Amino acid sequence: MFQHKVIKNAVLSIIQVVISAIILFILYRYLLDELGAAQLGIWSLVFATVSASRISELGLSGSVLKFVAQYLAQNEANLAIAVIQTAMISIIVFMSLVLLIAYPITKWILGYVISPKELTMALPLLPYALFSLWLTSLMGVIQSALEGCQRFDLRAYVQMGTQGLYLILAIGLVPSYGLYGLAYAQILQGFLLLITNWFFLRYLLRELPLIPWHWSWSIFREIFSYSFYFQVISISQIIYDPITKILISRFGGLELTGYYEIANRFVQQLRAILLSANRVLIPRFTELSTKEPIAIKKLYKNTYQVLFYVSIPFYGGILAIIVPFSEIWLGYYEIHFVLFTLFLTIGWLINTLSAPAYIAYLGLGDLRWNTIGHIVIALLNGLLGLGLGIFNGGLGVVIGWVISLIVGSSIYVYMIHREYDIPLTTLLPKESYLLVWVTGVGTVISWIFYDAFHSLKFSSITFIGSILIYTLVVIFPILQHPLRIKVINRLLPTT
């Protein structure tokens, strides 16, 4: 029964991410045509800078997932409800206070990074960005509670519906209101997400009141104490994006910031297709930590092997098609978008392979190494981004970010292998040697094909040709891989 539940949650999570990716591609192509890369850069910079205010969330969303799952497993729904209410009230109060302070600080930062002319376009967006962030923080608690209830499926349904609405609203409002129309669409989507997710959460936990009113000091102290590491992680994560975009804007300009936004969202959205299914394992690691600790090592190794088997050809495919795809998506060849995507793909591949270790530590409640990894990423990102940005502009900033991501992600992988006595040689599974080699060959052949035929100006044909060539090269090792049967059996379990 548990396996069926995990599979249902995983499949729906993947479907939701795929639909989100499709919506993202349509939306960004539309925004580039309607607004241009520079205005998209303004939007990205404003919202990234404002997002630093999420420090006031205190890492409570991560604590909610852990404690709701724990208390429900112990048949103590009343304590799970107390956790949700306490976290919601805390977020409402802390975020409201911090956002009031954040406005003048963000205004000053933007004035330092961009020109006065661009500032006149950015400043009116600030109130909308701050309010949208307030809604997002509340949604984070509710969505974490749904995940703690192991109802990823409900979250997926709501996410898919509201993202479709967001696309429709954006297309309808942007022509008349420009960037403000995009802000209106985002706020309306946030309201609908908040209300709908809260309705489903109250359906699952019938004693949860319509409006959170009960705040418990003992519960707050418990989740706040646990969330110390989450707080550090949240602070580190929150400053990644603003620092990177501020440095790109400073050394490369807003247009490059716009292209970085598109490239980063593109790769991260595709990455989410792989990781959305793995996130459902967090409650499973939590359960094993109390009931069957000896099985933790096996679950980690199996998860890593499957993710490696899927990730290598997946990310290789992104590299193989990115140039012709950029011409189709953007409508023209843009070297910065292509280079950003190439570097980001490499960085997020390594980060993806570190996900089983990261998720295991989340489920086990041991966040030391996850925290240290995030701190390293944040510090290196600032130092390398500044140093490489001075010498190599916006591209140098992105390279600095990718190096930081790889180094920090490697920390918790190394530590879980050391703590559970797992050889580091298993990071490159023997059964996947051929797959790795063939993926590299397929990527290079696709590049050669594009280089030979791109002058014909038929980008759609070269795009399809690149996909077919890459697929024909890698399909044999994928089908012959011993993990293929295991993956199929997990997706189609026998009754």
Image (tube, rainbow, N blue to C red):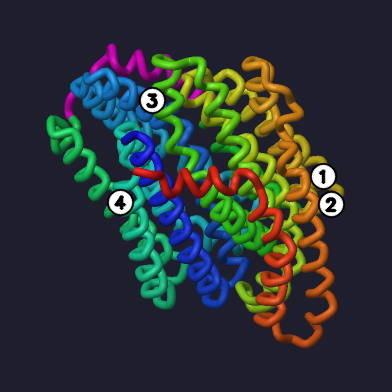
Nearer-the-camera pick, 158 or 134: 158
Residue at (73% x, 48% y) in the render:
346
Q: Is residue 486 above or below residue 361?
A: below
- Dot label at residue 392: 2
Looking at the image, can residue 253 be seen?
Answer: no
Q: Residues within 10 Å of mark 1 (few under 14, many from 20)?
A: some
Q: Secondary structure at mark 4?
A: helix
Residue at image mark 1: 388
- Mark 4 vs mark 2: in front: 4
Residue flagged by tag 2: what amino acid is it?
Answer: Asn
Side of 52 relative to 150 (left or right):
right
- Mark 3 vs mark 1: in front: 3
Give the CA separation, mark 2 to mark 1: 6 Å
> Which of the two labelled residues, at mark 3 and mark 1, occupies the earlier sequence position?
3
Residue at image mark 4: 193
Q: Quadrant of the N terminus?
A: top left
Nearer-the-camera pick, 148 or 487: 487
Give the CA separation, mark 1 to mark 4: 40 Å
Side of 81 relative to 460 (left or right):
left
Nearer-the-camera pick, 460 or 386: 460
Q: Residues within 10 Å of mark 3 (few under 14, many from 20)?
A: many
Write the start and end of the magenta stretch as one range. 213-233
Q: Is residue 181 above or below residue 11?
A: below
Residue 326 location (% of width, % of height): 67, 70
Q: Are marks 1 and 4 in contact (CB under 8 Å)?
A: no
- Mark 1 vs mark 4: in front: 4
> Which of the two labelled residues, at mark 4 and mark 3, occupies the earlier sequence position?
3
Residue at image mark 3: 66
Q: Residues within 10 Å of mark 4 (few under 14, many from 20)?
A: many
Question: Is residue 221 highlighted in magenta?
Answer: yes
